[in-house]
Amino acid sequence: MLKSLIDAFKVPELRKKILFTLSILLLYRFGSFVPVPGIPLGEFSKMMQEQVAGAMGLVDLFTGGALSNFSVFSLGIMPYITASIIMQLMQGVVPAVGRWAKEGEAGRKKITQTTRYLTLILGFINAIGYLFLFKSPQYGVVFTTALPEALTNIVVVFTLVAGTAFIMWMGELITQRGIGNGMSLIIFTSIVSRVPSAIFESTTSNADMGMGIAITILIVAIVLLVIPAIIFVERAQRRIPVNYAKRMQGRKMVGGQTTYIPLKVNSAGVIPIIFASCIIYFPAQLAALFNVGWLNSAANAVSSGWINWIVTIVLIVFFAYFYTTMVFNPEDLSNNMRKQGGFIPGVRPGSATMQYIKNVINRVTLPGGIFIALIAVVPSIFFFFTGNNLIQAFGGTSILIMIGVALDTMNKLESQLKMYNYDGFFK
């Protein structure tokens, strides 16, 4: 691993991409501490330490503490993720969006542009919600009186929406010019940034310092034991063998090879976790916008407790199937194989092949979805009964996102590293 990183830095192009990615992520973390103009920073931080729990705690986790600081990045990346989910769902509901998805590069540009506009709209709604929430009697934040109240409100909302647009721009820059998926890396950075403070709180929150250190070491040891199992499932595959019959193409005889279709046990990767977290996060967004008692209670119920555990498992399994069916279309795979003279041994071409692939996908996706759902929920159950912040920081959702993003980033770096005749990360 270390040798591969050293090799990556030896290649000027890769070195520039890695440093560019790190620079953007550093800029993102810096922006998480830049407060919105007009906010009484000291008073607000003290109030948030007492109030952040339940739904707001979930929101603050995915912003990397930016919400606790009421910084320019308080909205985080979630408006963009929500917009992406909406566009994904619209591909199967709205015919025009479905056609865009099949138009290649031109269609992807239309989807990307629409996602950007939708992100700004959602960011604008969230910004107004936070403004009303923090000015409500529940929080009682008094913004600066140096400017008229209406002008102060406009500045706060504009700053938050601009922060969301800036995060979206930084994520796209990483994807285009850096290493890995920019949006995923921003979420990864937000979660990882909370780990050091969580470790400190875990060791000092207990009256007995020795007991606090012992609990912290136990939690870290369990996490280190779980990581190999997660990596094993992330890289596990079900390979469907495919044979290609020999045929004449011009004057050459082609075909005759044997290959396979690799179906990962968790082909959706970290996407179901992010999508499920975003859906669970949505009631908290509504609660922040309307600040109604029953809505706040519903948001807190969905954000923690047995309702949260059941909803999380159902959503993760659902999105595992949803995303897998979007990536692997059995009908398209069957047609492409038939056109190229390929067939699965023992299975007739055509509809039988399509049904066979569909059945394999369903059988493989279910255990993968259940596994990541349990990994996401079990730590939440322990946190609910113990209240240890380290469990929340190292929770199943957090650790799956961190491992999934790390593996995806290393795979992309490895593929580029091999272009320069270097060994990759995975031997």
Image (cartoon, rainbow, N blue to C red):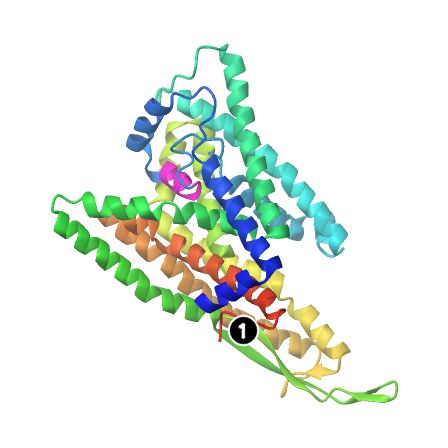
Q: Nearer the viewer, residue 318 or 148?
A: 148
- Magenta-drawn stretch, dominant element (helix, strand or loop): helix
**SS for tag 1?**
loop
User: Which residue is painted at 39% across and 49% down in the image?
Assistant: 192
User: To which residue does mark 1 refer?
Assistant: 423
User: Which residue is painted at 41% across and 59% down in the image?
Assistant: 373
Position of residue 5 in the picture relative to residue 65 (left or right): right
Q: How many labels does the image show?
A: 1
Tell me where residue 47 sits by quadrant.
top left
Locate residue 378, reporting x and y percent: 32, 57
Q: Which of 263 and 64 is in front in this view?
A: 64
User: Which residue is painted at 44% across and 28% down in the image?
Assistant: 35
Position of residue 189 in the picture relative to residue 54 (left or right): right
Tell me where residue 293 sits by quadrant.
top left
Q: Quadrant of the N terminus?
A: bottom left
Locate residue 289, reporting x and y percent: 47, 29
Q: What stretch is highlighted in magenta?
A: 55-63
Q: In this view, does 397 lie above or below 292?
A: below
Callout 1, which amino acid?
A: Asp
Badge 1, how many Cα within 10 Å: few under 14, some, many 20+? some
Residue 39 in sight: yes
Q: Does the magenta stretch include residue 57?
A: yes
Locate residue 133, reporting x and y percent: 42, 25
Q: Nearer the viewer, residue 347 or 420?
A: 420
